[in-house]
Amino acid sequence: MAVQLALERAITADRNTKALGHKCRNEREKAAWADCVKLYEDTIEQLNRTIDPNTKCTDFDAQTWLSTALTNLETCRTGFAELGVADFVLPLMSNNNVSKLICNTLALGNNGTTHETSGYYKDGFPMWVSPGDRRLLQALAVRPNVVVAQMAVTGSGFIARGITFRNTAGPQNHQAVALRSGSDLSVFYRCGFEGYQDTLYVHSQRQFYRECYIYGTVDFIFGNAAVVLQNCMIYGRRPMDGQQIAVTAQGRTDPNQNTGISIHNSRVMAAPDLAPVAGSVRTYLGRPWKEYSRTVFMQTYLGSLVHPAGWLEWDGNFALNTLYYGEYRNTGPGSNTSRRVRWRGYRVITSATEAGRFTVANFVAGRSWLPAIGVPFSAGL
């Protein structure tokens, strides 16, 4: 079985990675190595969960956890590159073809079906999430008006309500994540995410955001989760001189991953500091971060700050799959008050059936677990 073989090789690769710690030459290399150790441990957990008969997982669960495992391995490599230390320790880390085995398994298991599931959830969580874990996660998360910075959440079933996640590093300090979420079946309700570059890192797993506001400048909603942001307010902030704004940067690396960013019934607007100079700053809906980047805007209001080109190309070799469904309204000079988008190179969804693939019901199987959480949601369009 490919997953079993991937698990065995991931365990070997994890041991090899841990043994390389003493070879790190500086703090940046050590930081990238430490992240990889954690990511390999999480990958082993995801693969174990996929093949454990006691989890009673659905095909959609398996696809999610395999997608997460693949994202973890890519994040490990990316970390070394972004810190500028990819020349020494990284080449010594043997992947043992784990990524290829996971890709093959995803290809075999992807039958193109939607993902409504039922019959194995209790109180809004899968049966494999223990009651103790649920209580702990809820107790940690449901604390109104708590302001935190650079927070990361993992595990399963994280719930946050009425919390502002803020990173105060400012635009001059480049990447400054307010929240990194890799928690499966996680919910953020009426929360705020405030930062500049890379504000909200939707790293992996299935996530739902409702009535939240997100502020940022460069790639400020990014990652490779299967995530729906619904009824949210998305604000571009004033960047540094010469910078462009990109709202999203989605990181799907394999066409069979069930991941993407779906923004539904929301608004993209200029923050107060950007509004007076919005005409001099190019603001794009996003750019492809990885080869099979997938972002969907559905029935969402786009303010006049959005550049007529719509999307910023990252690399001409990348096959960006970015979709739009619904009416695009832009009240800027020379624009119509309501028109269908026709941006070059990007596809407009005209079928409600196709758009339905990216709704709460199908993209994150929301009908199966969200009702018990107690937050409002629209399952369909």
Image: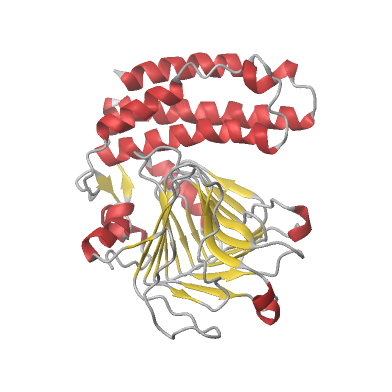
**Residue 191 position in % (x across, y down):** 53, 65
Q: Is residue 25 left or right of residue 107?
A: right
Q: Quadrant of the C terminus?
A: bottom left
The answer to whether any part of residue 128 appears in the image is no
Coloring applied to the structure = secondary structure
The residue nearer to you, when weighing 45 against 226, is 226
| In the image, residue 177 above or below residue 233 | above
The relative height of residue 335 versus residue 61 in the rendered view (above or below) is: below
So how many labels did they put on this image?
0
* Residue at 44 percent of width and 28 percent of height: 45
Q: Quadrant of the N terminus?
A: top left
Residue 266, image x, y percentages:
44, 71
The picture places residue 141, in percent across and down from the top left corner, at 52, 55
- Residue 157 location (% of width, % of height): 42, 48
- Give the residue furthest to the left: 119
Q: Quadrant of residue 2?
A: top left
User: Residue placed at 56% from the left, 50% from the top?
Assistant: 314
Location of residue 246 by image quarter: bottom right
The answer to which of 26 and 312 lies nearer the viewer is 312
- Describe residue 311's horizontal placement relative to residue 53 as left or right: right
Does 197 sit above or below residue 315? below
> Picture quarter containing residue 156?
top left
**Residue 159 visible in image:** yes
Residue at 55% of width from left, 58% of height from top?
A: 312
